[in-house]
Image (spheres, rainbow, N blue to C red):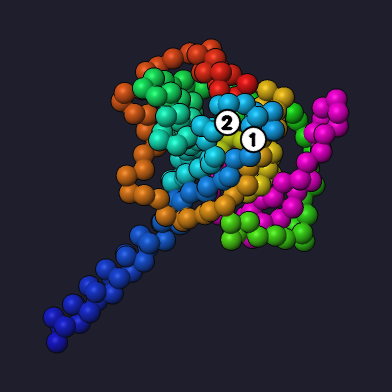
Amino acid sequence: MKAIITLIALVLILHSCKGKNSDSSDNEGYIQYELQYPAEIMSQSISNILPQYMTVLYKDNQVKFKIKSDLNLFVMEFLSRSGGDSCYSLIKMVNHKIYYPLTKGERWFLFENASPFTYKEHKDSVSSIAGIKCYKVDLKYEDKKGTSAVAYFTSDINMNHNKMHTPFDKIAGIPLKFEISYNKQLFKFVAIKFSPVLDSDESFSIPDDYELTNRHEIEDLLKMILN
C-alpha cells in the first residue's frame, strides 16, 4: 500500500514539474511584420529583391530582429542579449558576413534617427492586429514639421519591450503597427503573424563565420541598398 501511495505521489510531482516547464514557454515567441517601403524606393530596379518581412524573435530576455530577402541573399539582424546589455548589428550580403557591437546608447540603424515625441494612449480604442488585441497610440514628433502618426501597441505579448531598443521604449507595450523614418524615408511595419513558440534551432548568438567590422561599413552597405 505504501508503495502505491509513493508511486501516486511521484506521478503528481512529475506532472506538477511538467506544468511549470510548459509555463516557461510563455517567455518565447516571434512576431512577423509586413514591411512597406516608400514609393521612391519601390520605383527602383532593386525593389524586387528587397525583403518583404521583418521578424522579431524573443526568448529569456533576449531579442532578435531579422530582415531578410528571398534566398537569404541579404540578411540584416539586430541582437539584444544579456538582458539588453550587449547589442549587435549583423549584415549578410551574399557571402559577405559582418557584425558590429553597438556601443552604449547606440540603437539599431533603423531606429537611431527617430525624433523625440510625445504620445497619448487610447486604451478604449481597441483593434485586432495579427489576432492580438491592441490599442491606439497617437504620436506627436518634436520635429520642424510637427509630424504626427498613429501606432498600435499590445500588452498581451509577454516580452520586455525595453529589450527591443526601439524609439518607443517609454510606451509600456509591444508595437504591432508603426512607422519609422530612416534617411528621410518613411518605412511602415504591420504585424501579420504571432506565435508563442520558437523553432528549436533558433539561435541568439553571433555565427562563427561572421567577421567583426566597424560602424562605417555597416552604414555604407545599408545606404547602397536603401537609398
- Kindly identify the residue that appears in the image at 39 percent across and 20 percent down: 96
Q: Do we see residue 31 in this rendering?
A: yes
**Disc 2, SS:** helix
Q: Disc 1 residue type?
A: Tyr
Quadrant position of the N terminus in the picture: bottom left
* Residue on which disc 1 sits: 37
Measured from the top left, where is residue 185 in percent x and y?
A: 70, 28
Asked if the residues shown at circle 2 and circle 1 are in contact, with their CB atoms under 8 angstroms apart, the answer is yes
Measured from the top left, where is residue 51 in percent x and y?
A: 52, 35
Placement of 183 over or under 186, stated as above or below: above
Q: Magenta part of the protein: which range? A: 133-162
Q: Nearer the viewer, residue 129 or 52?
A: 52
Q: Tell me if 43 is positioned left or right of 141 in this view.
A: left
- Kindly identify the residue that appears in the image at 42 percent across and 29 percent down: 73
**Disc 1, SS:** loop
Placement of 223 over or under 162, stated as above or below: above
**Number of on-image labels:** 2
Q: Tell me if 104 is positioned left or right of 197 in this view.
A: right
Q: Disc 2 residue type?
A: Ser
* Residue on which disc 2 sits: 47
